[in-house]
Amino acid sequence: MALEWQVDVWLNTRAPLELSQLRGRVVLLHAFQMLCPGCVSHAVPQAERVHQEYAEHGVSVIGLHTVFEHHAAMMPVALEAFLHEYRVTHPVGVDVAVAGISIPATMRRYGMQGTPTLILIDRAGKLRLHELGRMDDLRLGMMLGQLLAE
Amino acid sequence: MALEWQVDVWLNTRAPLELSQLRGRVVLLHAFQMLCPGCVSHAVPQAERVHQEYAEHGVSVIGLHTVFEHHAAMMPVALEAFLHEYRVTHPVGVDVAVAGISIPATMRRYGMQGTPTLILIDRAGKLRLHELGRMDDLRLGMMLGQLLAE
Amino acid sequence: MALEWQVDVWLNTRAPLELSQLRGRVVLLHAFQMLCPGCVSHAVPQAERVHQEYAEHGVSVIGLHTVFEHHAAMMPVALEAFLHEYRVTHPVGVDVAVAGISIPATMRRYGMQGTPTLILIDRAGKLRLHELGRMDDLRLGMMLGQLLAE
Amino acid sequence: MALEWQVDVWLNTRAPLELSQLRGRVVLLHAFQMLCPGCVSHAVPQAERVHQEYAEHGVSVIGLHTVFEHHAAMMPVALEAFLHEYRVTHPVGVDVAVAGISIPATMRRYGMQGTPTLILIDRAGKLRLHELGRMDDLRLGMMLGQLLAE
């Protein structure tokens, strides 16, 4: 089973979200940093498109702001401005900082190696993909289509 | 059930292909013209990528050269040069010309309105999508993923 | 001085064009083939943009169809369809074929190594650039701006 | 004559830069915000390319961080991280904040209407272009080429 995330600030959602609440849906969790170029140009807008087009077909898109460098530059107030300017409407959680280390809690728990990282979790809550780097639209669509059909 | 295509010249395949032979596979049939800009920049390379990446996962990609204008410019000898220059490796059939009308036989039989046209046929041989124009990679992936999972 | 081109068929112009007539203007001569992918995706539309935006500022854009392979696929009738479909409005000349060799006359005279090839000729008729391959917009603009200012 | 800028923090340069020092060079001044999508995807990398390719040919590229919204999210510490992550190497100055108003000093002095704004100043120190929004590479090259040739 995919591990629960640890988030202390949520944006674009009225109530905190837990993975366990999303059972029955396909979950696209994308870990990003607002100053990571590959996230900004590719992973974040790709996730937003999935949200816009497939939320109503059973995909829950969750952004996870996993700041592991330049912490002072990527505080929640900056993230909020980023999401506004880039018109990101899907829920985004701030990964909980851990005292004394630069890697935040969920990032460490999942063993993520950097950003962007894409994670797909099936309707049963099982981790099905964990991948670092740029994900091709065609391949992402294929995987989501297969997970939705299960 | 999807209708059989009518082809008199095949390229990139040793033997002629019939739709009925492909039962059990998902079929992506894309109708194009070698001088149609939207086909050349988008639909043909997209189809080739699906072929390269998903042929072994059960998708059969078939190009159909449906010449309905500039016939003298798009004869099979020209098509062959086009496929070579654009490194198209998936099978392509030339839609059979019909005496006295500009629209070739399969194009007419399917009621295609122009190029590019994308057609998806499921493992059971049933037509599932018929769409004119540019198809988004994410959406195409979603549909193929769902058809493969059936 | 840049050498005169040899053309036997002109498209997109009422009268044949000679380089000597264009003295006083900056000339952008681009050699292409209608089935050369890099020409179709980049060099031809780039040349057309220069024509659209800078013809009235002193730049004459001339396409030269230098067919050196797949001759049967790129006859003038096919070129005409190509120019129509890709909405090319600048003058295009067909480089004169030479009996017994695949390289046409102007291509050989200029020592062009392939397509696309870009040639810039200054207001005095002197060759200033001869380059094979993809030309960056910024760099092309820089060179044209400097030649126009002379 | 172009007005002097007002900057209190400089990055990517050892010493503060004044416009008056750059007489004899063509100056490309681009006003941006690190959370402005059009700046990040287009104007900043375009300016950096001009810097990389044309600094030694007489063009001085200067970025001006004109924060007029989300001030807390775009402090100098955040800008520094942004420049590092996006590999911006040309000099960037932070436009001086003005107490009580959101528009910083140089932005107001120049009458800039938003970001990105591109300003070109000729070798004599005269303002030659002031434009809001996305600038085409070809057109920018043309203007720079002409200014360099003066």
Image (spheres, coloured by chain):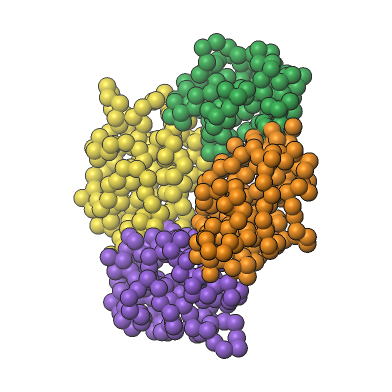
Chain colours: A green, B orange, C purple, D yellow
Report the residue that reaches farthest toward the front. B100
Give the camera-side residue of D35 and D89.
D35
Residue ID at (33%, 79%): C15
Report the residue that reaches farthest toward the bottom. C99
Give the camera-side residue of B116 and C70.
B116
Q: Is residue B134 visible?
A: no
Q: Is residue B122 left or right of residue C59?
A: right
Which of the 4 quarters of the picture holds residue A133? Answer: top right
Provide residue D42's location: percent of width, then percent of height: 44, 45
Residue ID at (35%, 38%): D115
Residue ID at (67%, 46%): B3
Total marks in image: 0
Provide residue C139's location: percent of width, then percent of height: 43, 61
Which of the 4 quarters of the picture holds residue D9? Answer: top left
Residue ID at (56%, 27%): A51
Give the camera-side residue of A43 and D15.
A43
Q: Is residue A67 left or right of residue D44?
A: right
Q: Is residue D81 visible?
A: yes
Quarter of the figure that contains the N terminus of chain C: bottom left
